[in-house]
Amino acid sequence: MKQFSIISSAVAAALFSQSSIAAVITGQVVDKNQQPVVNAQVHVHGKSQAVMTDAQGEFKIDVDSKGQLHVSKDNFIDKRVDINGDDQSVVVTLTPTSVETVVVYASALHKNSLEMISPVNVLSGDNLKNKAKPTLGETLKGLPGVNASYFGPVSSSPIIRGLDGPRVKITQNGLDSSDASRIGPDHATSNDSLAAEQIEVLRGPATLLYGSGAIGGVVNVVDNRIPTDNIETLTGAAQYTHDTVSNTNTYAAKLETGNNGFNFHFDGTKRTGDDYKTPTFELPEEHEEHEGEEHAEHETANSVENTFIDSQTVNFGTSYVGEHLTLGVSYGRIETDYGIPAHEHHGHAHEEEAGHGEEAHEESVFAQLEQDRWQGYMSYALHNNWIENISLRVGYTDYKHAEIEDGEVGTVFSNKTTEARATVEHKLGLWHGMAGYHYTESDYDADGEEAFTPASVTKSNALFLLEEKQFGDVTVELGARIEDYQIDSAVTMAEHHHDHAEEAHDEEEEAETINYSADFTNLSLSAGAIWQYQEGQSVALSVSHSERAPLSAESLSNGVHIATGTYELGLGYHIEEGEIHFEPEDIKQETATNFDLSFRRFIGDFGYTINFFYNDIENFYYQQNTGYFFDEEHGLEMAEEVHDDAMAVYQFTSKDAKLYGLEFDVHYQVSPSTLVKVFGDSTTAKLKDDNNYLPRIPANKLGSELQYTVSDWQFSLTGTHYFEQSDITAYETKTEGYTLFDASANYQLDLGPVDTQLYINVDNITDELGFVHSSFIKEKAPLPGRNFSLGIRGYF
């Protein structure tokens, strides 16, 4: 209590102390041709107060001590100017960059994409609008180091450097998306890229701010549903797109307005589409031929059944933005029905082949996703000598995913999440940083035949600290996070004796329930530096240590997972003589040590970003084939006794692993109207003890893009080759390589006050047949065939 009293007194003193203005800095910001740069932002590094340059590029800002002015402007290299705390006048010359620069909201310390120590990609503006797909995975998969899990185009999550699921945190405005996409690959993420202002991809561990679920990286979807800047006039946007490959129509709209500090936001999307078409491919054989039967020809298909989508989203938000205080709240609603391809009913006879007849249509399985999401935001800028800003983000999400079978509700997955993140941005001497507290509580439940993971409640409480300091041209960043992670669940023993399934049908037994509880302390540490050794050129190095406790699906799964066609067991189970026993005592945390080395050039006509990474992971959780099979009638059985409807039994286990590779993006401005890019990535993932490969690691890719602008036209042509993936586990098959060519054309219309664009995109121009190695259903769901996207968008 004494320590708490001392800390409280110190914070109170900082809150109510008055900063004395020591000096006034005036100046002008110009480009290399000595022309004024309008609307450049000028602020004192480590503090939130900022001013914008006027039409002559001039500014005036009050300062209370010596320090640095940070001058930034989109598409220019940031400039820092030392100030001595006395009245003075400065002239700042900004150099244009060869790449787009944007502020990365997930960085926490107001860094732009060129200042980040950890590798980052940002999709924003028209580039994001042109690449936006129904899912995050498909939207982002063209970025270096990013791929997609691909359970059909309507359920596809991002994979970062070979890591996905619970190791990639997906957030919306910095708070967890709180869906069930980490439970199974057939569960779609609840984030819509059409409503996004920008999407940020942080590679490598980002656990310090976002928790142990970010051990592989973060995908942050940024929108303006809670406006943080004052809106003075009515603005809006509208868009319509038609895709031919699935007959999909997409509508999107946004409206924003404000007055006297009060701001209002609305956005909504509507998307409907049918099953998507593919190049002709052979369907895999479902059953072995019986003795005496003649060999039948392989059945072929040119579409993937049950991949329709019917989705609508709406978001409302309002805020008050004053000189010191920003306060806002938002509400979002998602309703989506989408087909689940390759969803098989093991143990049930089908009278007609899939895809033929009315009965087959009735047996199709689809998901109904509903989500209500509330968010609140408060920020208070103190303009104090050492406490700059205090902020709070809170969120509550009510998510439900129901699987509809034969017209009736089968299994229902639900997740109710409460999250809060409080931060204090400060400046202590020459160190600028952020301290914070992060709380999450997730109440997960599953009810139905496919509820292979029991209900659980997960809570975490964390404290984190992130600090940076400049030493000349070098910026050093240090961070730490300590997290208490607790999971509670009621596990029924009846689930553990499927080998006695026949007796269970004849004789009802009272299920024994075990109250399972586990508590982990996760520690994360990081250190990194970026050296701007020449203007527009830098090298960055970071090292991090991250710990992660298993999710309930990884530790407590015990049941049939229809989406993957397997029977899944968690880390807490043990198979002995054909019987399953619950023994969760020896579960260890997953611990990753990650190294990142980046080289960047973003000045002049030639630029590049090259990232090398090495990730050493102890107790890596992954699914291993046990050699057992399961069916509803006979329970567990060995391979020599397998029945037709039996499914392989896969169990989560933990072994030491290593993942390493590189990613690069090189560009050359051939002329003012022509830009050429080359990009690619490579990831190798192995177990350390026997050098066996990890399953479903994405294939390496290499691509090139040509951008050409003439008058009101913008053209692009992209070719991406996905190499053969033959680095596989014993139970995988290799995936052949393929090449995709995509093109787009945008035309800018002059319609007075409405900024209008007509566009056409052609994906997979050559109608290439491609299979995604990281997909659980790669043989049943190849990539879409040739697709024309026609659309119009307007802004006012």
Image: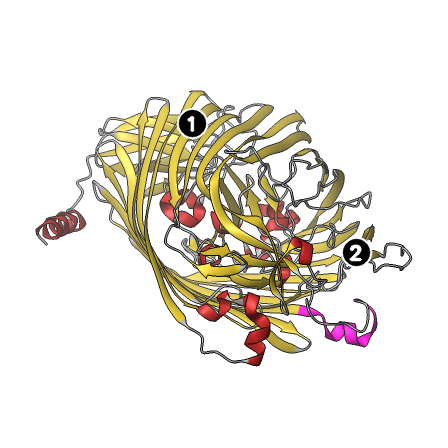
The residue depicted at 71 percent of the width and 64 percent of the height is 308
Kindly report the distance in space between the C-alpha atoms of the residues bearing marks 2 and 1. Answer: 49 Å
Q: Amino acid at mark 1?
A: Leu
**Does 760 sit above or below residue 85?**
below
Q: Position of residue 68 (x, y in %)?
A: 30, 30
Residue for badge 2: 285
Count residues near mark 1 (Cα–Cα under 10 Å), then give few for <14, some for 14-19, many for 20+.
Answer: many
Of mark 2 and mark 1, the one earlier in the sequence is 2
Rendered-image quadrant of the N terminus: bottom left
Rendered-image quadrant of the C terminus: bottom right
The image quarter containing residue 420 is bottom left
Pick the front one: 264 or 283: 283
The answer to whether residue 441 is seen in the rendering is no
The image quarter containing residue 226 is bottom left
Please state the total of marks drawn on the protein image: 2
Pick the front one: 327 or 641: 641
Foreground: disc 2 or disc 1: 2
**Does 410 sit above or below residue 235?**
below
